[in-house]
Image (cartoon, grey):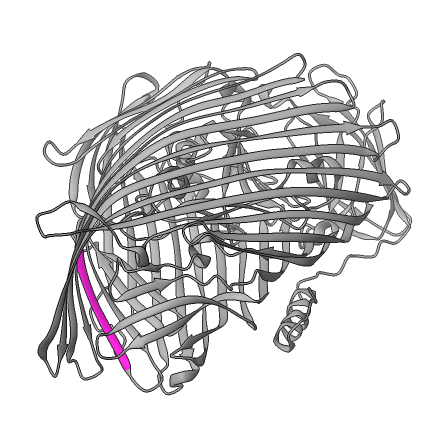
């Protein structure tokens, strides 16, 4: 496949590079004149301290000028220094940091004499260190936050702490964004910890248990081993516990109720002993604390499916294709009224000098949700506009059991073996009722449809992987083998009833009843393997050679039955709505990559993979098949520049393909929504994506100034779009996937933050933008859609120990959408979102706190309802017992009773606004107990 960059893409690249060049701060030039020397000693044992770090900083902006380490006799010398005023910082683990000001003249030989270091454990209790050094540290692509440097109210959860960290955002559902990217995995001490649900760690652990919080792009095991970036990265958050929390046990017990309708009970227990970790949790709640996240969808039955495909290196890509219809849907994210039960066990350990590692877990989840909602939509057509109004209610129940395990052994100093396995079984039940109306631009009714559906589904999944790694005596020479399998089976049975009424000139013209039974079965099975060999060219560069195979088989069987008579059984098969279809992709790929690294300066890698993808489609019902293949070229490039105290600059490019899903290609009509009918397209080709990423980060630790910025851009050839055929007489849309060229998307994000020492404030400014350019077809007419949004907002926090805390952030966003078929109709609106949290510490062990979330949404000509919301919460706490290990809490949720569920969506020529039931005003009395047995008092 040829690779072609579009003019708009070339222009975007030039603009992006120019933008980030402006960020680069010049590196100071050092003269070769003065010397600063001295000796580092221990005050208690009167011995010289070796290997101590001595850093020389520029006072104006805390730029690192020079650094060294003390020798075995504790002596050091900073040489070749320019004249000027500096700060000398001396630091060593377990000792209090030492600072001193020094002025250096030309040619001077400054002797600081003996620098006396004091153990932290020996500092007097009444001594309070006012300046915390190194609240944020950047090491390569890892940003590390020192937890105690960011003050939160005693008893706060990890989630509360994350909201205060520069560059990290947490939304109301617990979803985390770090440096502008969604966090996909949360680790505890570098290990999986109830991996399906990050909120177990962020909401179950208390902030005072943490030593550090780290964010980074986790590379694949293969890339970590060889040092060659394979493009597989997962934005990861690692919670590093304090050493004293790794001994004994600690946990949290909470029980709360309003005495009538609402209840919230949860338990988190952790028992750590060195490398051994045992954890358990249980949750019962109907206040939205379900313990479930978006990944739960992969483990429930219905029409949703998980698909795995090979990437450019023959590795594994996992994609989630879900249909939010009667047989699918995600977990609870604020829509409806939930009742959730969740429990889990976790055990991990390391033995034999960490040569053997075991990580295992079990989870149970159940979620019942009752929901009501209304959706109003606008379709912009070439010479007209259609509207649809839908409201309905639903009940959904989902249940799942899952086990997982990891076993890793270091066979010797040169080889290791890692095995993972997971299995789950789930079931779900749903019942839905919808009322739909379609209208033309004059407001005339075109159709009224009432539909009901029920679905009973179950799911099975099993996956495993194996990774063998071998090093050789020659530095950089490695051999590795990775293999994996995934098997998913879904089965659903449901009833679909639809009463369809169509109007002409405002009078009923025709009616049609649909009464059907749906039987859906699907299987996804994949096996893949990849071998990689690296050969060093010299001390700084190496080559990697790879070969991989991947076989991905998907099968879908859809059976639609109807009754022969109104009182009969569902026995007559509707052939036009039934199918038995299989789709298989066999991929072989080989490639070569080059990597060059200059330690502490930069790393560079680039390469090319070539693959052959053999596709085969079979219509098992019609006994027909077709086979075809593609030869693909996958370029890759990565560059990482470490600019010392000025920060880090990273660039990444990946080319990759995406095969169509089996739902997109199988030639069958989905009529479950009579106003939105979908038809598959067997002629779909694979899509090819060019993905660019550019990021920059910088941190100055004395002034505590931080900068984060990144830009992502994707251009797609043969992208998947839709051909929409509109029936203006009924308001019905029939859509079919097609391939188009010229689509691109981009987004960017930045954050600037600094501590205002004079006032004790932390202040920040964040901004973001999104652009989307895509093409679809409406009644065979080409339609180009352009939408973009941009916004910015401030953040501010202040903490006075045991007296007062304040945190605020806000964003202002502008949204614009245009379509070429109706250039006269442009959708424009703004949104504002503000969050405020205040805490006050009172005498007699009382504390009060309040938080407020304010959402302002501009009305449009189509969406003219007032959907502004001010959600105000408050609480009052009273600490209890010795060491304040417990507290009783009276809390109020949504005091003004204004909370509404709201979502506005712009997609091509389609604009919709949805409102729905969600949690509103309630009051709750709770008892919370933070228990611990590790020699440390609780940190309320």
When the figure is inspected, residue 138 is found, relative to residue 756, above or below; the finding is above
User: In the shown orientation, is residue 699 left or right of residue 51?
Assistant: left
All told, the count of numbered labels is 0
When the figure is inspected, residue 837 is found, relative to residue 93, above or below; the finding is below
Q: Which is nearer the eye, 837 or 534?
A: 534
User: In the shown orientation, is residue 649 left or right of residue 301?
Assistant: right
What secondary structure is the stretch in magenta mostly built from? Answer: strand
Kindly tell me whether residue 937 is visible in this rendering. no
Q: Which is nearer the eye, 364 or 884?
A: 364
**Magenta span of residues:** 385-392
User: In the shown orientation, is residue 512 left or right of residue 671?
Assistant: left
Provide residue 232's location: percent of width, then percent of height: 62, 46
User: In the shown orientation, is residue 351 left or right of residue 237?
Assistant: right
Provide residue 894's location: percent of width, then percent of height: 20, 49
Q: Which is nearer the eye, 113 or 32?
A: 32
Quarter of the image that includes the N terminus: bottom right
Residue 848 magenta:
no
Quarter of the image that includes the C terminus: top left
Q: Which is nearer the eye, 59 or 146?
A: 146
Provide residue 262's location: percent of width, then percent of height: 16, 36
Kindly tell me whether residue 522 is visible in this rendering. yes
Q: Which residue appears farthest toward the front when viewing the image?
A: 623
When the figure is inspected, residue 698 is found, relative to residue 289, above or below; the finding is below
Provide residue 261's location: percent of width, then percent of height: 12, 36
């Amino acid at each position: 496949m040829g690779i072609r960059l579009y003019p708009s893409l070339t222009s975007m690249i030039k603009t992006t590079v120019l933008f980030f060049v402006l960020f680069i701060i010049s590196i100071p030039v050092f003269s070769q004149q003065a010397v600063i020397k001295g000796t580092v000693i221990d005050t208690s044992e009167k011995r010289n301290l070796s290997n101590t770090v001595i850093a020389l900083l520029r006072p104006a902006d805390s730029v690192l000028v020079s650094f060294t380490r003390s020798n075995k006799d504790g002596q050091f010398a900073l040489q070749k220094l320019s004249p000027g005023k500096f700060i000398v910082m001396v630091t060593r683990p377990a000792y209090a940091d030492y600072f001193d000001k020094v002025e250096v003249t030309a040619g001077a030989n400054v002797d600081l004499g003996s620098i006396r270091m004091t153990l932290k454990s020996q500092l007097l209790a009444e001594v309070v260190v006012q300046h915390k050094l190194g609240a944020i540290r950047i090491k390569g692509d890892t940003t590390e936050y020192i937890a105690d440097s960011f003050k939160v109210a005693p008893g706060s959860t990890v989630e509360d702490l994350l909201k205060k960290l520069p560059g990290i955002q947490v939304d109301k559902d617990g979803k985390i964004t770090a440096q502008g990217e969604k966090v996909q995995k949360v680790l505890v001490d570098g290990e999986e910890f109830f991996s399906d649900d990050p909120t177990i760690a962020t909401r179950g652990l208390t902030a005072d248990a943490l030593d550090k919080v780290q964010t980074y792009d986790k590379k694949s095991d293969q890339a970590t081993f060889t040092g060659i970036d394979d493009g597989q990265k997962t934005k990861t958050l690692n919670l590093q516990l304090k050493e004293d929390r790794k001994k004994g046990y600690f946990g949290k017990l909470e029980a709360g109720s309003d005495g009538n309708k609402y209840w919230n009970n949860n338990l988190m227990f952790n028992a750590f002993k060195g490398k051994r970790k045992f954890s358990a949790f249980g949750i019962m709640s109907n206040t939205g604390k379900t313990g479930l996240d978006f990944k739960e969808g992969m483990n429930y039955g219905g029409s949703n499916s998980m698909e795995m495909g090979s990437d450019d290196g023959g590795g594994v890509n996992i994609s989630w294709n879900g249909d939010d219809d009667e047989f699918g849907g995600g977990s609870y994210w604020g829509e409806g009224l939930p009742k959730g039960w969740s429990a889990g066990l976790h055990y991990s350990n390391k033995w034999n000098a960490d040569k053997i590692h075991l990580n295992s877990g079990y989870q149970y989840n159940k979620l019942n949700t009752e929901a009501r909602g209304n959706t109003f939509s606008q379709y912009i057509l070439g010479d007209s506009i259609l509207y649809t109004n839908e409201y309905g209610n639903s009940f959904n129940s989902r249940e799942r059991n899952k086990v997982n395990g990891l076993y890793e052994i270091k066979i010797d100093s040169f080889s290791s073996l890692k095995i993972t396995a997971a299995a789950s079984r789930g079931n779900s039940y749903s019942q839905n009722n919808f009322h739909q109306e379609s209208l033309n631009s004059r407001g005339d009714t075109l159709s009224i449809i009432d539909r009901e559906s029920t679905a009973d589904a179950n799911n099975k999944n099993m996956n495993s992987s194996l990774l063998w790694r071998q090093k050789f005596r020659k530095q950089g020479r490695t051999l590795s083998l990775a293999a994996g399998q995934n098997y998913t089976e879904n089965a659903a049975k449901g009833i679909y009833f639809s009463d369809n009424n169509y109007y002409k000139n405002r009078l009923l013209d025709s009616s049609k009843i649909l009464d059907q039974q749906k039987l859906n079965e699907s299987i996804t099975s994949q096996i893949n393997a990849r071998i990689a060999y690296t050969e060093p060219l010299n001390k700084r560069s190496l080559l990697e050679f790879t070969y991989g195979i991947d076989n991905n088989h998907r099968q879908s069987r859809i059976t639609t039955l109807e009754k022969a008579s109104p009182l009969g059984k569902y026995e007559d098969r509707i052939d036009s709505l039934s199918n038995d279809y299989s789709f298989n992709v066999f991929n072989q790929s080989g490639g070569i990559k080059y990597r060059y690294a200059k330690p502490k300066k930069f790393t560079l890698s680039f390469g090319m993979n070539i693959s052959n993808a053999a596709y085969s489609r079979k219509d098992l019902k019609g006994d027909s098949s077709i086979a075809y293949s593609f030869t693909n070229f996958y370029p890759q490039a990565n560059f990482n520049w470490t600019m010392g105290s000025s920060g880090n600059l990273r660039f990444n490019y990946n080319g990759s393909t995406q095969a169509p899903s089996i739902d997109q290609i199988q030639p069958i009509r989905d009529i479950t929504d009579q106003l939105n009918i979908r038809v598959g397209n067997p002629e779909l080709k694979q899509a090819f994506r060019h993905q660019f990423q550019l990021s920059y980060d910088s941190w100055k630790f004395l002034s505590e100034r931080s900068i984060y910025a990144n830009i992502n851009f994707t251009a797609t050839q043969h992208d998947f779009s839709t051909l929409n055929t509109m029936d203006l007489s009924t308001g019905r849309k029939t859509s079919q996937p097609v391939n188009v060229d010229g689509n691109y998307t981009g987004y960017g994000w930045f954050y600037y933050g600094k501590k205002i020492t004079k006032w004790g404030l932390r202040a920040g400014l964040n901004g973001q933008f999104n652009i989307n350019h895509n093409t679809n077809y409406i009644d065979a007419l080409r339609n180009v859609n352009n939408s973009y949004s941009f916004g910015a907002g401030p953040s501010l926090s202040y903490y006075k120990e045991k007296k007062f805390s304040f945190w605020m952030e806000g964003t202002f966003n502008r949204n614009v959408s245009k379509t070429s078929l109706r250039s006269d109709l442009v959708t424009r609106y703004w949104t504002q979102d503000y969050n405020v949290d205040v805490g006050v510490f009172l005498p007699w062990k009382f504390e009060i706190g309040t938080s407020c979330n304010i959402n302002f949404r501009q009305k449009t000509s189509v969406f003219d309802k007032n959907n502004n919301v001010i959600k105000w919460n408050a609480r009052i706490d009273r600490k209890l017992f010795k060491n304040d290990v417990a507290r009783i809490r009276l809390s109020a949720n949504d005091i003004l009773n204004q909370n509404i569920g709201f979502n506005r969506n712009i997609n091509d020529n389609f604009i919709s606004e949805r409102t729905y039931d969600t949690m509103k005003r309630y009051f709750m009395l709770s008892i919370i107990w933070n228990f611990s047995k590790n020699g440390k008092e609780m940190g309320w």
